[in-house]
Amino acid sequence: MGEQMENGEITDAQVCNEILVGWSGIVDDDNKEIKFSKGALQQLIDVPMVATGIATAYFNSLAGIKRKN
């Protein structure tokens, strides 16, 4: 998948749709938990730069790259 990203064959949003199968701890403005669904995932990745951040974090985790504090 990383190679497909580099070649422009797959988008960040497509990566998110492929790798995200659930979540926990995601809440709305009223602090109510947002249950995972394909619709909720689509709303999340429609937010500018969110899909890029998720895809980047995913590939960095595979490479063992840690964030500096």
Image: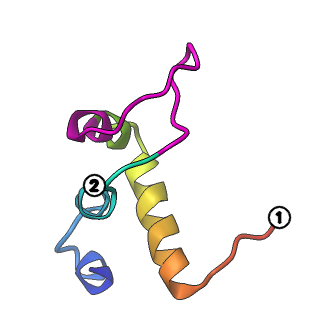
Q: Earlier in the sequence, mark 2 or mark 1?
A: 2
In percent of width and height, residue 45 lies at: 34, 43
Which quadrant does the C terminus fall into? Answer: bottom right
Residue visible at 22% across and 34% down in the picture: 39
Which quadrant does the N terminus fall into? Answer: bottom left
In percent of width and height, residue 60 lies at: 53, 76
Residue found farthest to the left: 9
The amino acid type, in three-letter code, at marker 2 is Ala
Q: CA distance from mark 2 to mark 1?
A: 27 Å
Task: Report whether 25 appears left or right of 36.
Answer: right
According to the picture, the residue beneath numbered tag 2 turns out to be 13
Residue toward you, 21 or 52: 21
Task: Report whether 69 appears left or right of 66.
Answer: right
Residue found farthest to the right: 69
Picture quadrant where residue 29 is located: top right
Residue toward you, 32 or 13: 32
Start and end of the magenta stretch? 24-42
